């Protein structure tokens, strides 16, 4: 088996990375940064998000494992003192592969610039660079609403516990192949009206955001954010590809939700 390790880069994560690399080499596993079959992230959820973005071109061939060196994460669910146990599990046991849905984002531009394709594990966000954010939201090619406010967030089921949750979105089990649109501070009064509730779209539905006046936006894809100019539209749907997690111990989604937000 070929593996690679993505470290958060702090001292604790780097030390753990070194130890893990040595242990795995002792079991004859091959370190291969280019074509890994297993990507182990050491750090936090943000580290797993960046490992996912780095290896998103190899989703069919790669399984992900997350070790946290801070507090328990959603994706990073192994603790530093469990790495010997993890290495033995990798070497001796058949892992279970758990697949989670992803979000596909396509940004179309004016003036003939070629569209850009992105995949998100948590979510995509769109906000104005300046002034009120105004965008037409179309669902299944029909105008649904003209949104005015701070911005919109489109999340995956596993991302529903991240930014989406802070926006009042629902928590969705990752076995439900869907995407969720949640509002950031919509303007609602006698003149302007939005639905005001998060919307959950099934696998076969797509949603398009069409800018009304402003064409430059601040786009967030997971932990990354960048300004995109002259946008014609943005399309969101459940991606055809999924992320694969290698599971060596049971850690059900609802236990993770309870552990993260309610406590034992
Ligand atoms: P960060 O270090 O600020 O992490 C933010 C927090 O989000 C961390 O505690 C992390 O553990 C948690 N997190 C990440 N993915 C999660 C998930 N799927 N479920 C539950 N918690 C999760 O930033 P980062 O490490 O660069 O992570 C980027 C993520 O931060 C974004 O994808 C977004 O979801 C989240 N975020 C949240 C808010 C908010 O809640 N208001 C605002 C901005 C970004």
Image: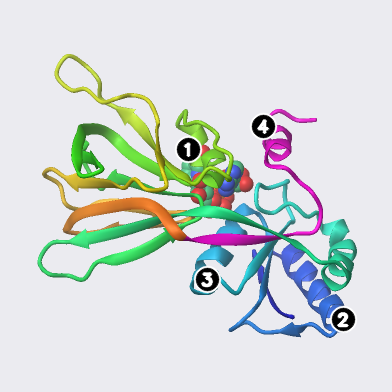
Residue at mark 1: 164
**In 3D space, how far apart are the residues under numbered discs 1 and 2 (Cα atoms)?**
41 Å
Give the label on residue 7, or none.
Answer: none
**In 3D space, how far apart are the residues under numbered discs 4 and 1 (Cα atoms)?**
14 Å
Q: Residues within 10 Å of mark 2 (few under 14, many from 20)?
A: some
Across and down, in percent, residue 256 comes to 71, 40
Give the label on residue 261, or none.
Answer: 4
Magenta span has 133? no
Instruction: Kindly identify the residue that appears in the image at 73 percent across and 43 percent down.
Output: 252
Residue at mark 3: 54
Across and down, in percent, residue 6 comes to 65, 70
Looking at the image, tell me whether mark 1 or mark 2 is earlier in sequence order.
2
Looking at the image, tell me whether mark 3 or mark 1 is earlier in sequence order.
3
- Viewer-closest of 59 and 113: 59
Residue contact at pointers 3 and 4, CB within 8 angstroms = no
Numbered disc in front, either 2 or 3: 2
Kindly give the residue lying farthest to the top in the view shown.
190
């Amino acid at each position: 088996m070929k593996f690679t390790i993505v470290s958060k880069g702090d001292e604790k994560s780097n030390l753990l990375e070194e130890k893990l690399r040595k242990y795995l080499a002792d079991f004859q596993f091959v370190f291969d940064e280019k074509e890994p079959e297993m990507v182990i992230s050491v750090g936090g959820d943000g580290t797993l998000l960046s490992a996912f973005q780095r290896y998103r071109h190899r989703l069919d061939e790669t399984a992900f494992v997350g070790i946290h060196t801070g507090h328990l994460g959603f994706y990073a669910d192994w603790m530093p003192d469990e790495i010997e146990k993890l290495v033995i599990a990798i070497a001796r046991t058949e892992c279970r592969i758990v697949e989670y849905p992803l979000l596909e984002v396509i940004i179309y531009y004016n003036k003939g610039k070629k569209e850009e394709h992105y995949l998100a594990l948590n979510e995509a966000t769109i906000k104005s660079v300046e002034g009120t954010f105004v965008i037409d939201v179309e669902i299944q090619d029909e105008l649904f609403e003209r949104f005015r406010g701070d911005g919109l967030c489109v999340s995956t089921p596993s991302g529903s516990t991240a930014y989406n949750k802070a926006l009042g979105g629902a928590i969705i089990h990752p076995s439900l192949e869907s995407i969720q649109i949640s509002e950031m501070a919509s303007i609602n009064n006698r003149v302007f009206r939005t639905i005001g509730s998060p919307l959950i779209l099934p696998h076969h539905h797509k949603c398009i955001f069409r800018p009304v006046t402003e064409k430059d936006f601040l786009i967030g894809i997971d932990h990354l954010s960048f300004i995109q100019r002259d946008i014609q539209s943005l399309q969101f749907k459940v991606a055809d590809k999924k992320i694969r997690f290698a599971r060596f111990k049971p850690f059900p989604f609802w236990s993770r939700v309870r552990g993260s937000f309610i406590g034992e």
